[in-house]
Amino acid sequence: MNPFRYIRPTKPQAAIDAVANDPTATFIAGGTNLVDLMKRGVMTPQKLVDINRLPLTKIEHDNNGLRIGALALNATVADDRQVRERQPLLVQAINAGASAQLRNMATTGGNLLQRTRCPYFYDLALPCNKREPGSGCGALEGINRMHAIFGFSDKCIAVHPSDMSVALVALDATVQVSGPKGNRSIPFADLHRLPGDTPEKDTTLEPGELITAVHVPDGPFTKHVSYYKVRERASYAFALVSAAAALDLDGTTIRAARLALGGVAHKPWRLLAAEQALVGKPATEETFRQAATVAMQGARAFKHNEYKLRLAPNTLVQALNTAAAA
Ligand code: SF4
């Protein structure tokens, strides 16, 4: 591991200034992804700004929804009574991620900012535009069975690994950030970006911007929800494909739906057209299959991930069936 400086500020502004004024600096919280990346030499920050002493751990409910502090641990959020009652989809998604040990270390903000698990990104001997812009994409013509079927570019076909983010994009969350230019709120769907010509940028955060909280609005999605994750090991693995489904039912008629897929794109993949296709329809498997067909429009596979073209709609239908029956 490269040598680095380490500071532990107690005030958010001090942490923001420390990163904003030094392009070699980065924030660290739980470190469950960053430390791995540093050990392998994939990321080599020269200064770590440890934010664990900042007052960002609270989980609160206001009139509009839940405000989850960026330093609230994944396990704490999933175990919180208010979160369990108001946002069960989020709880299911968090508990589908990683292992119990990791969920006890990983923070809310860090979960959103974890980096792709594309194997080429982690191997310094192989080309990767995300790690080293301009070096090429090893996965494009290489082993790409874990990779994207939506929204990719010829520069990068990686997928975003977070389960929590799939639920948050479906639930219309917003991300609250503080930075050198002040505070702002980012709709969750705009936090992560598609690779385009600059796959080295995972998010729309500006240098020095710190996630302080995630806000999840109240809604009717407290019962008929399901986060369904397909992976190679049930105990601990990233998603091949996952689906978040939340239904608001009037008897057996769908009043509203929220849908997103994970493991299919460089960002959590919201399915707005498929949601619209469900409204006013009976909550049956036939309806769900029609919505899944809508959801898959525009999908394209590579040499080794063609299975995702079948797995993704089937996963979505499974999640919808489970949500309807909940
Ligand atoms: Fe790198 Fe993206 Fe290509 Fe993977 S898919 S090798 S992360 S550029």
Image (spheres, rainbow, N blue to C red):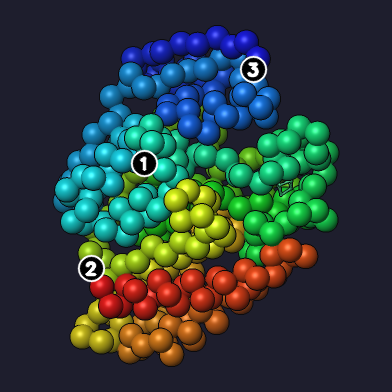
Residue 100 vertical position relative to residue 25 in the rendered view, above or below: below
| Nearer to us in this view, 123 or 135 | 123
**Which residue is located at x 49 percent, y 71 percent?**
315
Q: Disc 1 residue type?
A: Ala
Residue 153 disc label: none
Dot placed on the residue nearer the N-terminal end, 2 or 3: 3
Residue 223 disc label: 2
Q: CA distance from mark 3 to mark 1?
A: 26 Å
**Which residue is located at x 30 percent, y 29 percent?**
56
In percent of width and height, residue 139 lies at 76, 51
In percent of width and height, residue 85 lies at 18, 56
Residue 100 disc label: 1
Q: Is disc 2 placed on a helix, strand or loop?
A: loop
31 vs 196, left or right, is left
Q: Quadrant of residue 226?
A: bottom left
Q: Disc 2 residue type?
A: Lys
In percent of width and height, residue 164 lies at 41, 50
Q: Residues within 10 Å of mark 2 (few under 14, many from 20)?
A: some
Q: Mark 1 or mark 2: which is in front?
A: 1
Residue 1 disc label: 3
| Nearer to us in this view, 136 or 242 | 242
